Structures are given as structure tokens and as C-alpha cells.
Amino acid sequence: MTADEGRAEAAWDQLLAALEADGSILEETIGNIRATVPGYHDVPTSALQASVRRNIALSIRTVRAGFEPSSDDVAEADALASERHAQGVPVESVLAGFRTCMSVILHRLLDHAPDHGIPADQVLASSTLLWELGDAFSTRAVLVYRDKDVSRALADSTRRAAWIGDAVATWMEPTELARGAALYDIPTAAPLRALAAHSQPEEDLEHQRRLQDWADRAGIRVLTAVRASTLVGILIGEPPLSAEPDRLTLGLGPAVTLEGLPRSFESASTALRAAAAVGQTGVVDLERLSWRAGVHASPEVTALLQERHLQPLAEAGAFGEHVLEAVDAYLRHRLSIPLAARSIPVHANTLRYRLQRFQEMVGADLGDLDTLVELSWVLAAHRGTLPHGTHS
């Protein structure tokens, strides 16, 4: 190193040391941030002083090092961003505050460089380093905010799901129930319905999407969560009968007020299980299921009727299946021979023949009311055993 280079380096060290010792930089920076950067009104002065001191030290360290910093070189951004995130300061304000700090340092550097004989090209290089430091700091701070926002969103989502699940499926303390209702905009006096759908981990997000699409089309609101093996939720509003969720069976409970949701959910769950037992899809409740809910509730009766009416047909093989199809069509079309025949489709005389053979094979009378009730029951149960989408 030449003597001139030594003197230049010493002058540069003196200038940077003077900047480090200059307490007015701290005061000016804090004043500028308070006056020009929004979002800092809730940040305590002591916390702001500490972060500005760190930023000043980081800026001078970068200038002294003399090389372009990377985001890995500004660990200070992690602590600052985490602290400001917790204080509710927007990330844009954090970045603006850091640049305000660098701007004060840069102006002091420009003002005092001539007094120390610092060449203009060295001052220019240092100012470039400071703005590159701003870019590196911004990159790291934004990543911290992103991670914090994701974590906060996940935590909020978890708390929301837990509250929905508890409000629907358990009896909550009134204060906690009211707090969640206010937080999630759920009416406390207007009628609500609990809902239930089957849950599969790989399908839950898709089911929730279908539910939301249905709610949007129906002009209602739904709040959902997964609890155990069931997709549970709260329905706000009354869906029109014509609106059905896409490829989803949904059990609904009766309309209740907020504190009655567990009772509504019990009914919705029963309806969901009953619908599965009879192969019914779409929106179901106990009122719409009517007597079909008994198929799920009384398996002994179902087994008895299957033995009485279906077993003889099963023993007849393929012909028995055709006979069962004819009986099913006959009942579904209100005992109308022409409509039932057209629905299969077969000739009306063919349908009559199969109905007659049914009576002979089973020993039943299709003109007897008890027989018709029993057949409606056992055929509903039979549809529940068919693969999804194969029953009418």
C-alpha cells in the first residue's frame, strides 16, 4: 500500500467512525420515520431506537466492507421484520423506514466526505452499496413477512375450524359461542342449520369448494370444518329446493338458533347416514327422507324384508334381476304400467308378465298396501347397496 493509499484509507475510517458516533443521525432518522412513514404510531420509541441503531450499524458495516451485500448478509432484517409484523406495521412501511435510515446516512456521507478528502468516485461507490443493501434488506424482510402471514393465516384458519367444529358438534360456553359468532359474522338470533357430509382427506378441499359453489348459487353462506370423519358446517340462509351441490350428498339439520346447532347437527348426521342406506344423494334431511330414514335405523326389518321379497328373485339369476327391475319401475311410477314400461324400457305386456311372475315367485300381492310398503322399503335399501351413480 502506498502512502497516499494509506492516508485515503485512514481518512475513510475516520469518516465512518464519525458517522458511527454521530447521535444526531439517530434522532433525525426517528424524526423522519415518525413524520413520513405510516404505520409506526404503535411502535414504542425504545423499539424504534434499537432498530435504527442496528440499521445504522449495518449500513456503515456494509460501506466499510466495500462489496455488494446479499440477503444472507442482512440477518438484522429477520428480527426487525418479525418485530414490526407483530406490531402490525405493513411491510411497505418497514421497507420505507429502512430506506429513510439509509438516506440520512447517505446525506451525512455526502456532506462530510469533502471535509475528509474522500474522492467523489469512492462516495459514489458507497452510495451504490447502500442502495444495494436496501434491495437485499427488502428481499429478506418480504420473505419474513410472507412466512409470518402464511403462519398467521394458518393459525386463524385452524382457530376458525376448531370453533366451527365445537359450535356444531359440542355444547360450548355461551361467552365463547358469542365471541366466535361475532368474529365470524354469524347471526345469534336468525335461524341456522347444521350440515354434515362424508369426509375423505384427499377430497375435503374439493368438497368444500363444491359446497361454496352451491352456497354462491343458492344465495346462502356456509362455514365448514373437518371434524373426525365428517365435514361439518353452519348454513346461514334457506337454500331453494331446486339448488343441489355438485356430486355431493349433504345432510341438513332443522333450523335452530346458534345455541341449538348441536341438536341440528345430530339430525343432519342421521339424515346423512340414512341417505347412504337408501342411495339418496344431493341435499337430504329427515323431513325429505320421511320413512326412508327407518331403513338405516331398523336393519333387522330390512334384513327380514330382503329375505322375504328379494331372496327368491336372487335365486332366479338374471331373470330375477329383470323382475326386480320391473317391480322397482312400477313403484317409482305410481303403479302406472305404461310409464313403468317406458322407463325400463320394455313392452307393457312384458312388464305385466314380469309383475305377475314376481307375485308367483315371492307369494306376494301387488294390490296389497302392506306389500307395497314393504317393497318400497326393501327396494330403497337395495338402492343403497348399489355403486354410486347406478341408482335412480
Image: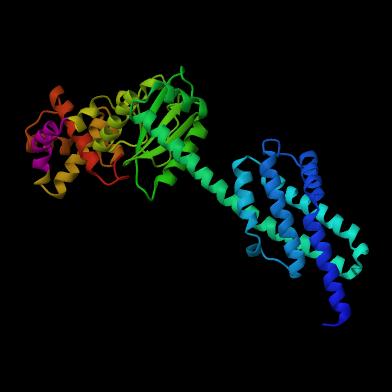
Q: Is residue 334 left or right of residue 182?
A: left
Say which quadrant the N terminus sits in: bottom right
Q: Is residue 237 visible?
A: no
- The correct choice, above or below, for 116 with respect to 198 in the image is below
Q: Return the residue nearer the eye: 200 or 159.
A: 159
Q: Is residue 56 left or right of residue 205?
A: right
Q: Is residue 155 left or right of residue 26?
A: left
Q: Position of residue 141 (x, y in %)?
A: 65, 53
- Where residue 352 sits, quadrant-wise, is top left
Question: Does the magenta stretch mainly form a helix, a strand or a loop?
Answer: helix
- The correct choice, above or below, for 206 with respect to 126 in the image is above
Q: Position of residue 112 (x, y in %)?
A: 89, 59
Residue drawn at x 30%, y 34% as measured from the top left: 272
Q: Is residue 222 left or right of residue 25?
A: left
Numbered marks: total: 0
Tell me where the magenta segment starts and ends, as one range.
298-313
